[in-house]
Amino acid sequence: MDLSQLEQKLDVVFNNKNLLKESLTHRSYLNENPSRETPHNERLEFLGDAVLELAVTENLFHQYPDFSEGDLTSIRSALVNYQMLADVAKEIELNNYILLSKGEAKDIGKARDVILANAFEALLGAIYLDAGYETAKKIINVSVMNHLGEVIEKKLYKDPKSLLQEIVQEKLKITPIYLVLSEKGPDHAKIFTVGAYFGEKLVAQGDGFSKQEAEVEAAKNALKHVS
């Protein structure tokens, strides 16, 4: 696989190409290709997660000197959750470079988004090891922090269910309710679909690996219809 195009998108040229390959190797790929010497990316993901959190924290700390710890934490969470990181990964077309098993390659939706988010964190870990913190921070500023305006404008840092309840109670004088519409998949990887209702009207749906996560996704989608 030619990874030079990805390096070009990132404006980074790896000295150690094996680090880049490792960051893009999902565990499932090694299950089907046990002879491959490159490790899977979970250790790099662990490192990249820490690098990402530090860079975002540092940026927010200096950019919002009057914000409380709670506000900064909420904004950071909105910037580094897997949905946001999956969007960032899609923007750099990371999906074209990740090595997956044939089964995982067919998967779409939330499970794929988690893989994309994890791979992006692994990529940051690889960049940190290969080129240092400042280079990793530069990538984070370009790819992640450019979503800060969207997070602030759309109040994505607020709990979606609480925000939806505030708006709907003010506009419609009712409280949103959430009902499970379906459950799919094996017990260890079950995906729930939850509907957000205003009275008896189904306004939006959301998927999640737990009922709570699905409710949050449903609330996020419902906010698009009321804000």
Image (cartoon, rainbow, N blue to C red):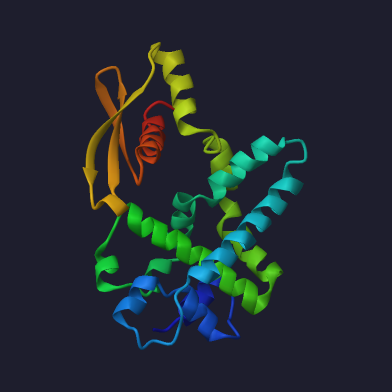
Name, please, the residue furthest toward the top: 173
Residue at 53% of width from left, 70% of height from top? Answer: 43
Quadrant that contains the C terminus: top left
| Horizontal side, residue 132 vs residue 46: left or right | right
Give whichever of 71, 223 is nearer the camera.
71
Residue at 63% of width from left, 58% of height from top? Answer: 141
| Horizontal side, residue 135 vs residue 91: left or right | right
- Looking at the image, residue 212 lies above or below residue 106: above
Residue at 63% of width from left, 62% of height from top? Answer: 51
- Looking at the image, residue 62 lies above or below residue 27: above
Camera sees residue 91: no
Quadrant that contains the N terminus: bottom left
Residue at 57% of width from left, 60% of height from top? Answer: 49
- Looking at the image, residue 9 lies above or below residue 33: above
Residue 163 picture location, percent across and down = 49, 27
Residue 149 picture location, percent across and down = 59, 44
| Horizontal side, residue 42 vs residue 113: left or right | right
Number of labels in the image equals 0
Camera sees residue 133: yes
- Looking at the image, residue 45 lies above or below residue 185: below
